[in-house]
Image (tube, grey):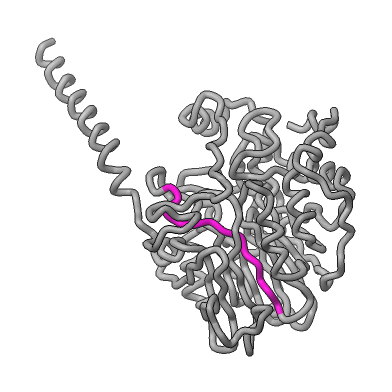
Amino acid sequence: MARLIRPLAGLLVLIVVVVGLGATIVPRFLDRLYYRGPPTDHFDGARFVNPDRDSPAPTLPGGRAGFFWRQLTGSDGRPRWPAQVAVTPARPAARVDGDRMVVTWIGHATVLIQTQGLNILTDPIYAERAGPLGFGPRRVAAPGVRLVDLPRIDLILVSHDHYDHLDLAALGALWRRDHPAIVTSLGNDSVIGQAGARALGLDWGGSATIDATGLHDTSRDPRCDPDGWCPGDRARVFVTRNHHWGSRWFSDRNRALWSSFVVRLPRGGNLFFAGDTGFGDGLWPGEAAAYGPIRFAMIPIGAFRFQPGQMASGSHIGPAEAALIHQRLGAARSLPIHWGTFRLSYEGYDTPPRMLAAAMRCSGGDGFAAQPIGVPFEVPVYAPPARGTPMTAPEMMRCLDTPAVRALR
């Protein structure tokens, strides 16, 4: 018996030592300094913050460990999702010229926009799972355009470094094939560089121009006119504020910045890509709209419910707040994204678009409704939209406090 106890005791001591070392060494090893620069109102010299106050982490019943365990085992009582959603992938045209704009939702936050001879792609994720080392939520909807069927990409926008938005394998493959211009926010260029791709990382308020010779940082370019348009521009990208956070591992939290984007085109109105965001102070949509009329916006509506009845979390808007953002942008047409591809939270599969429809009825606006994955649709040139009734977030929540909405799980 003593012979058996001694090795077991030694094994127990070894386990304790390994766990202790892991708790102290591994997080530091996994921490990365993606960006170095002077402090600002949203960078303390080491980590980025939301200047409109950082939001607390979502309340997870049973704590973070319990949440992940129940998610892994399927024992958390959430409404069932389909194991697989039927998708017929599109095969887009090589180019769309002139003022026509053709948009294809590929899934999650990945959208292909084709207009005026440019092919623009947002947060391209083609991974089967949204997480590190093959872990994380599994994709239930295949990409709406296969990676090999994507036309030659001219511009990629990468909003932040979370695994469901920054897919190194997809970025590396697109870089090797097309060498697109990649614009992101500070620090994410370092992460993207791990795939062998080159990206331009800019701060909020920074801008870059795509012209016949490539991509240029034009944040302080004296050639540009007072409206920010430069000679020979095909498009100009403005990196704009939103409200979120970033991390590739637990210990590198907020080492890289998060952002939204405005893309100014020569004609027809601007594009807006919200990335991944909470509502925050609710002022940042107006900051984006100040760059000019928005023809087409991409706004997240999913992953907002981390406990029953929740309508939003600090870092994710739900459909109610998304409808307010659409209104504050003054967008003529918006596409709801960030739902129906990866199961990231508690809400049912089709709860986000159904709740969005109710929120749009509350606001009295139009131009913001769900589209199927992999089905191209056309977006007309900008025309002033029906604004509906301006609402505050509490007013929207009161309007949505109905039996029909409360029944949506």
Quarter of the view holding residue 348? top right
Residue 318 drawn in magenta: no
Q: Is residue 309 above or below residue 130?
A: above
Quarter of the view holding residue 251? top left
> How many labels, in total?
0
Direction from residue 14 to residue 370 in the image, left or right: right
Q: Quadrant of the C terminus?
A: top right
Q: Quadrant of the N terminus?
A: top left
Residue 372 visible from this viewpoint = no
Residue found at the far left of this picture: 3
Residue 116: image location, x then y, percent: 72, 81
Q: Residue at x 81, y 68 (%)?
A: 379
Direction from residue 131 to residue 151 in the image, left or right: right
Direction from residue 230 to residue 11 in the image, left or right: left
Camera-nearest residue between 225 and 258: 225
Q: Residue at x 61, y 69 (%)?
A: 238
Residue 66: image location, x then y, percent: 49, 27
Quarter of the view holding residue 97? bottom right
Direction from residue 366 to residue 205 in the image, left or right: left
Magenta-colored span: 253-265
Residue 166: image location, x then y, percent: 51, 58
Overall secondary structure of the magenta section: loop
Residue 264 drawn in magenta: yes
Camera-nearest residue between 220 and 142: 220
Residue found at the far top of this picture: 1
Residue 253: image location, x then y, percent: 43, 47
